[in-house]
Image (tube, helix red, strand yellow):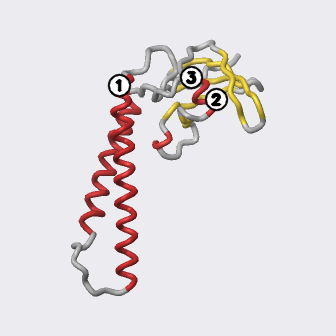
Amino acid sequence: MTSDPPPISAAARHALEQELADARTERETVAATLRDPDPVAGDRADAADELRRSGDLARLDARITDITSRLRQADDAGPPPAGVVGVGSTVTVRFDDDTEQTVRIGEATEGYDASLVTADSPLGRALMGHRPGDPVSYRTPDGEAAAVVVSLGGAPRARG
C-alpha cells in the first residue's frame, strides 16, 4: 500500500469544503473577540478567557491548514476510479460470521457517524481499491479478520 492520500468522492469533497468554510467563519468570530495587543489591566478570569480563545484560534488555524492540505492532495490524486472502493464510497461488506453491514468510507474529520469507517482504519485500508466480490483481510485487536465486498453504492442486498 502506498502512503499517498486516497482520492475522495464529490460528496466527501463537499463535506470537507463545508467544514473548511465553517472553520473559517468560526475563526473570524474567535479572532474578533481577542483584545488588541495593548496590555489592559484586567482580572485573572479575563486573562484565562483570552488564553482559551487564543488556544481556540490556534486549533482552528491548524484545522484549516489540515483541510486545505487534504483538499490539495485530493486534487493531485484525482477522483476515485469508478466501481472500486474509495473515500466517500458506500460499501456493503459480508464478514466471516456471515453478517452484512453497509459502511461509508470517510475521512476521520467527518465527525461521528456509526456507519463511518475511516480510510486509515484497518478495515478502511483493506477495502480501498477493491471491487464487489473481492475478499479482503485486515488486522483487528483480536487478530486477522476477513470480509468480502458485497456491493458498492447502496443499502445491503436482501439475503435469501
Q: For this view, does 20 lie left or right of residue 40?
A: right
Percent across and percent down for residue 108 are 50, 41
Label 2, on which residue? 101
Tell me which amino acid carries mark 3.
Met
Q: CA distance from mark 2 to mark 3?
A: 24 Å
- What number of labels is visible? 3
Mark 1 sits on what residue? 76
Q: Quadrant of the N terminus?
A: top right
**Pointer 2 or 3: first along the chain:** 3
The quarter of the picture where residue 32 lies is: bottom left
Q: Is residue 34 left or right of residue 160?
A: left
Q: Mark 1, mark 2: which one is toward the viewer? A: 1
Q: Residue at x 63, y 30 (%)?
A: 123
The quarter of the displayed image where residue 78 is located: top left
Tell me the quadrant of the picture where the C terminus can be found: top right
Badge 2 amino acid: Gln
How crowded is the residue under tag 3: few (<14 C-alpha within 10 Å), some, or many (20+)? few
Residue 105 relative to residue 95: left or right: left
Mark nearer the viewer, 2 or 3: 3
59, above or below 74, in the image? below
Point out the tag, 1 or 3, that comes first from the N-terminus: 3
Give the residue drawn at x 31%, y 57%: 26
Is residue 54 shown above or below 144? below
Q: Residue at horizontal 50%, vertical 22%?
A: 153
Which element carries disc 3, helix, strand or loop? loop
Q: Is residue 124 left or right of residue 83?
A: right
Q: Position of residue 93 (x, y in %)?
A: 63, 24
Q: CA distance from mark 1 to mark 3?
A: 18 Å
Among the two numbered marks 1 and 2 on one chain, the one whose residue lies closer to the N terminus: 1
The residue pinned by badge 3 equals 1
Tell me the SS state at disc 2.
Answer: strand
- Of the residues shown, which amino acid type is indicated by label 1? Asp
